[in-house]
Amino acid sequence: MIGPRAVDTARVLVWNIEWKRPRSRPGQAIGAIIERAAPDIVCLTEAPADFLGPGYHVEASDADCGYGVTDRRKVLIASRQPWSDVSHATDSTLPPGRFVSGSTATTLGPLRATGICIPYAMAHVANGRRDRKQWQDHRAFLAALPSALPCGKGASVVVGDFNQTIPRSGPPSDVQPALLGALADYRIATAGCVDGEGRALIDHLATRSGTIVASLHHIGRRDDAGRKLSDHSGFIADLRLA
């Protein structure tokens, strides 16, 4: 059950929706959950570019992430208010199509939201360009991320699919220190969190500059009838200024 939020909070919803189309059965169910939660900011990863309808201002990562599709995006960020100072980090060495950042107005004041989809271990190994080794693009993304993140002291969050559980379970020993180092100016508020099935999250939220998570609500991978919505659990975070 998604509870009401306090008036002095801003609500952020984060979910990898596994490419569900907005008019499909799971897509309609996902859309209804988003509508019911009424977030100020939405970050969807692995989503059709047109998934979110009227009522949101949407910014998307670049279409080219090496898989030859143009109607889907690795990352969407959406706000009830217009975005400004939008960046796709195209001048960085980030693996392409996995980053979008912008500033928007919220009840907390201006908030910078950066949506990311860190490549998973097998990115472009057995599919896509097939020119990478395991974890190569993941490591490359983390190495380039600090220079792409926004500077300054304003309220800022980094959200999306980090493709790691925190604490680490499975990746090579160097990968988690690289993630924590890339986000050294942030606190990963979802570290140690598990979903309603006891599964550790790989979608995360990191905060900076006195922004804290007042409450966190999990979104399950299945609907009330047990039908699959996504292979990821999502979450809703209500943010407050410390």
Image: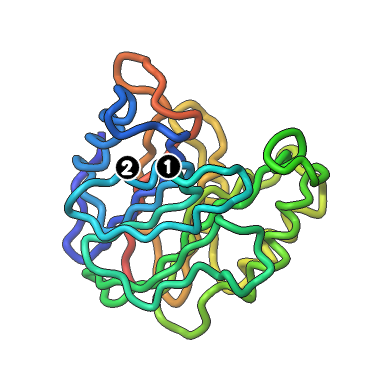
Element type at mark 2: loop
Residue tagged 1: 47
Residue at image position (55%, 31%) is 199
In this rendering, is residue 181 above or below 77? below
Say which mark, if any, is on residue 122.
none
Give the crowd class for mark 2: few <14, some 14-19, many >=20 residues within 10 Å: some
Give the crowd class for mark 1: few <14, some 14-19, many >=20 residues within 10 Å: many
Q: Is residue 55 left or right of residue 45?
A: left
Q: Are marks 1 and 2 in contact (CB under 8 Å)?
A: yes
Residue at image position (40%, 32%) is 20
Q: Position of residue 200 (x, y in %)?
A: 57, 37
Q: Is residue 186 left or right of residue 58?
A: right
Nearest to the observer: residue 154 or residue 60: 60
Locate the N terminus by quadrant: top left
Residue at image position (32%, 42%) is 51
Q: Position of residue 133 (x, y in %)?
A: 83, 44
Kind of residue at disc 1: Ala
Q: Position of residue 85 (x, y in %)?
A: 39, 78
Q: Label 1 vs label 2: CA separation? A: 7 Å
Locate the C terminus by quadrant: bottom left
Nearest to the observer: residue 143 or residue 184: 143
Kind of residue at disc 2: Phe
In this rendering, is residue 225 above or below 12? above
Picture quadrant of residue 146: bottom right
Residue at image position (48%, 42%) is 46
Q: Is residue 129 visible?
A: yes
Picture quadrant of residue 143: bottom right
Element type at mark 1: strand
Q: Position of residue 232 (x, y in %)?
A: 49, 34
In this rendering, is residue 157 above or below 221? below
Residue tagged 2: 51
